[in-house]
Image (spheres, helix red, strand yellow):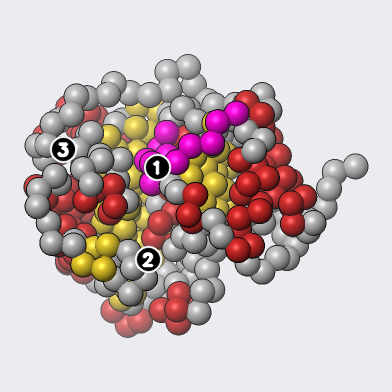
Amino acid sequence: MALASAAVATPAPSWRATNRVGERVGMTFSVATRSRPRAAARRSVAAAASSSEVPAEYVALAADLVDAAARITVKHFRTPLEIDDKNDASPVTIADKGAEAAMRALVRERFPTHAIFGEEEGIELGEGGSQEWTWVFDPIDGTKSFITGKPLWGTLVALLRDGEPVLGVLDQPVLKERWVGVKGQPSTLNGERIATRGCESLGDAYLYSTTPYMFEGDNLTPYKEVAKRVKVPMFGCDCYAYGLLAAGHCDLVIEADLKPYDYMALVPIIKGAGGVFTDWKGRELRWEGSQEALAAGKFQGEVIAAGDAETHAAAIRRMEMALGVYFVKPEK
């Protein structure tokens, strides 16, 4: 991991509220769009779009995209599946491939000038080579959870404008939970406004990461320096951990070895809930998008999300100290 100086990103305005989370619905394996919380989520999406710089029809499409994915993923969940291994040894199933194909078809149909980047099929530019607006998909973030029957995977849909994530949806169709973030608007869970929580100190923080095996080489020491200082380090939630953070249930998520489709959808959700989400150097998360850049590793792969700016700064400072390199000039 190359190390360089950068300024810590300014956190989004806080939307902290008393009622943090909407009603949780009992588990069932029916298609999620028929439940009342999903109807509330769609009303929330429409309301956010009406006063956002993101066009309303783009926000509506994001909801349709995760609905289309859910119709495929839910019917395959906890069923016998043929599992293939990709070049990086990560698993992929017919559910991953089918969900991404359905989402791509919807974007091509409605907005053919938009670019598409998905985990399974790579980058596809819009008509005329356009990519001002780029949709970023991860049809099943947490495929290992999916194939082992754990309902903490999710479908991630992001919309980037000139590399900046301005719209994000995290959908868990089995639990019927949907997080929506739109730039400049408060984030929601099933239509209810959510907020991150403040943390008294790094020592009081609950920290999530997907797996300890994602940290190796230059990434291991900074992670261990933070993990040994928090109250509880935990593993195993994939994208769901970011939803928990946005809803005020944990304080930090630190991860490494990620691709843009793993986190771009989560950026507007965390920021719209009052949190901070950057790379390990404190830089805003962006991706201009090209297959060449992806193949060359020219993207931000180490990320940190926190419920408040103080916890974010404290964690980054510990990572800096572990490496003996300061990304940000220390305060006097």
Closer to the camera in the image, 104 or 227: 227
119 lies above or below 273 = below
Asked whether 241 falls inside the magenta stretch, the response is yes
Check disc 2 and report its element: helix, strand or loop: strand
Residue 143, quarter of the rendered image: bottom left
**Residue under the image location 66 percent in, 29 percent down:** 203
Q: Nearer the viewer, residue 113 or 120?
A: 120
Query: Is residue 207 found left or right of 87 in the rendered image?
Result: right
Of the two numbered discs 1 and 2 in the rendering, the one whose residue sits closer to the viewer: 1
Q: Residue at label 1? A: 236
258 falls in the magenta region: no
Q: Check disc 1 and report its element: helix, strand or loop.
A: loop
Q: Residue 77: percent from the left, percent from the top?
A: 15, 46
Residue type at mark 1: give it.
Answer: Gly
The stretch in magenta equals 231-244
> Quick check: can you spot residue 267?
no
How far is the residue under mark 3 from the one under mark 2? 26 Å
Answer with mark 3 or mark 2, whichever residue precedes in sequence: 3
For marks 1 and 3, give the CA distance.
23 Å
Residue receiving disc 2: 134
Q: Which mark is residue 9?
A: none
Question: Residue 32 shows which numbered tag?
Answer: 3
Characterize the local packing of mark 2: few (<14), some (14-19) or many (20 or more) Cα atoms within 10 angstroms: many
- The span from disc 1 to disc 2 (Cα, nearest Å) is 29 Å
Residue 260 at least partly seen: yes
